[in-house]
Image (spheres, rainbow, N blue to C red):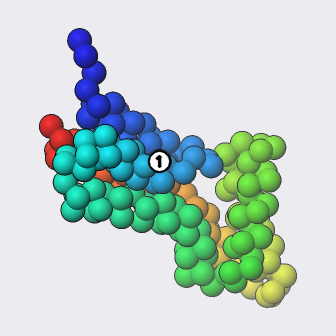
Amino acid sequence: MAISAAGVATVLLAVWTLSSFVPFVPSGVLAALTVVGYAYSTGFAEPGLAVVIALVLVSLTASAAELLSGLVSGRLGGASTLSVGVGTLVGIALLFAVGPIGLVVGVGGAVFLEGLYENSAEPRVAVRRAAYAVVGVLAGSFVQAVLLGGVTVAFALSVF
């Protein structure tokens, strides 16, 4: 039984969707490259240039959403851009030491400490800021997975 290029591309897109939850995997970029690679292999005859452009844009949007979700959410909670940025760096360092929970602890802890330092009389503000930042970091992976799942389904429908 021969495996078609469309089948391989669809399986790869499903893998990139699942890898949205794995740190440091550029799932959206890989999905965009998979779509472009398949289209190139067919001479851009399939799935069609408009579909390729749309799928690539959604894939790259998914990647951007994953990258920016913690920052946007932290800012909505009242945290400064600097504290969310430092929290992300601390979270990445702890990710290597402790695992995925280190990312959450690093982001939440750094934003909490900055909020507590800024306004020690009101610890609830620091907790709220940290909670927003952590929810944003976690939600980014889900948003990326949903968008890439849509890319996978749309790609499969357009080539099969």
Residue at 76% over, 63% down: 89
Kindly indicate the quadrant of the structure image that contains residue 6. Answer: top left
x then y, percent, for residue 147 = 35, 56
User: Is residue 156 placed above or below 58 in the rendered structure?
Assistant: above
Q: Kindly identify the residue that appears in the image at 61 percent across and 47 percent down.
A: 23
- Residue 133 in the image, given as x and y percentages of width and height: 62, 69
Report the side of 118 relative to 103 (left or right).
Answer: right
In the displayed structure, 115 sits above or below 149; it is below
The residue beneath circle 1 is 30
The residue at 68%/81% (across/down) is 81
* Residue 54 locus on image (x, y percent): 28, 62
Q: Nearer the viewer, residue 105 or 66?
A: 66
**Depth check, front residue: 53 or 122:** 53
Q: Quadrant of the N terminus?
A: top left
The secondary element bearing badge 1 is classed as: helix
Q: What is the x, y in percent for residue 87?
A: 74, 67
Residue 153 visible in this rendered orientation of the protein: no
Q: Is residue 11 left or right of residue 155?
A: right
Which quadrant of the rendered structure holds the C terminus?
Answer: top left
The answer to whether 82 is drawn above or below residue 52 in the figure is: below
52 on left or right of 105: left
Front residue of 128 and 160: 160
